Image (cartoon, helix red, strand yellow):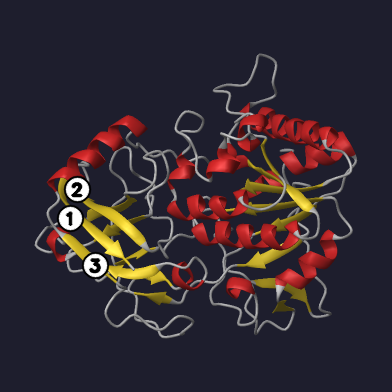
């Protein structure tokens, strides 16, 4: 399900940023939060329970995609426990790397509400890129024309989206923005395959079927154009199902197989949700295997991944620091509204980057919360807003 967030356009953001930069009189130098655990440390703090109402208009899906509470559309069932005698977990990367040698197309899905899925996808693509998978196709790129993604003044050269070409809710996730910066620097090409038509044409079997077939057809066209190469496909939820047991719906991956006779390696992050980290896997991920050590294939997927839940530091996942190189930074006191009866939305904008790129970080902060920002070194305009998006305060900070 696509989730749309109301967001100011590039011109409005430029004006707002210029206004607040002019009025800001406070410059803080932040080298990280006091008491922040050392890099690579497993030290964590208890996660404070914060109840936030996301039901108000135009903001029912929080852009704070690192919120640990999200299980949405991730199977909504826990992955089997490692204590279950029928299952165990292994490091997924060596298995995927080996299986990818036997395929020319790898497809992996995500829950649009779980930013960690996007981090894993970026890491996996970086690994497989060395193995010849140098065509990165993503549903999250919308229906942007392929040429612009790779031309000199397009995305791949700039490393950030242009508001003239996107406008997708996905870009508003700061983590996805950073992941795509890394992906864009790797050898190879980017391509899109989404169908953003508002309604299917007359005669289509339905909106879902039309979308799945069109995605598969678009991927086929790209694969045909670059025949003999290897392709990495990033999509959401059920699109990568090779078969749909118990339903008549045909998903994109199944249509793709029918159109091309190519069997993709399909990897699901949404079949179930993890309950704890797997110690030796990348990012704490585990690959589900049976009692014989063979990968479990089920529900139309070749491989089932278990993404970890935790650990956290001051309500933020540790991987923001250990994997993305961010620092945990306290929300400046001048924009902490601890006497309020409602939460505030805290957004950090990098003042040295164009206005159309995603924010560096977004958090919902409840009164008295100790939740921190997660920022890379740089200068930021940090803005506090209420649920009606009225600006309550702004401050400039610098992170070393």
Q: Report the number of discs.
A: 3
Q: Secondary structure at mark 2?
A: loop
Q: Earlier in the sequence, mark 1 or mark 2?
A: 1
Res. 96 image quadrant: bottom right
- In this view, the residue in front, 274 or 81, is 274
- In this view, the residue in front, 6 or 212, is 6
Q: Secondary structure at mark 3?
A: strand
Counting from the top left corner in percent of width and height, residue 337 is at 13, 60
Q: Which mark is residue 342?
A: 1
Q: Earlier in the sequence, mark 2 or mark 3?
A: 3
Res. 163 image quadrant: top left
- Label 3 crowding class (10 Å Cα cut-off): few <14, some 14-19, many 20+? few
- Distance in Å between CA atoms under marks 2 and 3: 25 Å
Q: Which mark is residue 130?
A: none
Does residue 158 sit above or below 90 in this rendering?
above
Counting from the top left corner in percent of width and height, residue 150 is at 65, 37
Asked if labels 2 and 1 touch by Cβ distance under 8 angstroms, the answer is yes
Residue under pointer 2? 386
Q: Is residue 270 visible?
A: no
Report whether 169 appears left or right of 93.
Answer: left
Q: Nearer the viewer, mark 2 or mark 3?
A: 3
Residue under pointer 3? 29
- In this view, the residue in front, 397 or 367, is 397
Counting from the top left corner in percent of width and height, residue 187 is at 71, 51
Q: Residue at x 87, y 37 (%)?
A: 260
């Amino acid at each position: 399900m696509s989730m749309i967030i109301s967001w100011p356009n590039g011109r409005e953001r430029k004006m707002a940023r210029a206004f607040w930069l002019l009025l800001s009189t406070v410059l803080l130098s932040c080298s990280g939060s006091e008491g922040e655990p050392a890099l690579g440390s497993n030290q964590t703090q208890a996660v404070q329970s914060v109840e936030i109402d996301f039901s108000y208009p135009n903001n029912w899906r929080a852009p704070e995609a690192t919120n640990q509470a999200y299980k949405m559309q991730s199977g909504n069932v826990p992955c089997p426990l490692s204590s279950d005698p029928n299952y165990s977990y292994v490091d997924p990367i060596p298995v995927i790397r080996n299986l990818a040698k036997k395929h020319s197309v790898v497809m992996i899905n995500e829950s649009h509400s779980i930013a960690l899925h996007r981090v894993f996808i970026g890491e996996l693509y970086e690994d497989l890129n060395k193995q010849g998978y140098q065509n990165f196709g993503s549903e999250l790129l919308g229906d942007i024309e392929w040429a612009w993604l790779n031309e000199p003044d397009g995305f791949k050269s700039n490393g950030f989206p242009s508001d003239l070409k996107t406008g997708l809710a996905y870009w508003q996730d700061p983590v996805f923005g950073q992941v795509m910066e890394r992906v864009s620097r790797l050898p190879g090409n980017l391509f899109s395959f989404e169908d953003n038509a508002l309604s299917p044409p007359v005669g289509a079997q339905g909106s879902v079927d039309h979308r799945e077939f069109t995605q598969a057809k678009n991927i086929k066209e790209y694969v045909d154009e670059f025949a003999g190469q290897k392709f990495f496909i990033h999509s959401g939820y059920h699109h990568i199902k090779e078969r749909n047991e118990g339903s008549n719906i045909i998903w994109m991956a199944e249509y793709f197989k029918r159109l091309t006779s190519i069997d993709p390696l399909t990897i699901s992050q949404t079949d179930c949700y993890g309950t704890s980290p797997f110690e030796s896997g990348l990012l704490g991920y585990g690959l589900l295997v049976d009692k014989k050590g063979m990968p479990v294939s089920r529900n139309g997927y070749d491989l089932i991944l278990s993404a970890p839940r935790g650990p956290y530091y001051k309500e933020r996942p540790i991987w923001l620091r250990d994997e993305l190189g961010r620092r945990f930074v306290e929300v400046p006191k001048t924009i902490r509204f601890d006497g309020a009866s409602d939460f505030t939305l805290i957004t950090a904008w990098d003042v040295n980057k164009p206005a159309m790129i995603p924010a560096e970080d977004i958090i919902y902060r409840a009164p008295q919360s100790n939740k921190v920002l997660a920022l890379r070194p740089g200068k930021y305009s940090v803005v506090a807003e209420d649920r009606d998006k009225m600006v309550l305060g702004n401050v400039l900070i610098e992170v070393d």
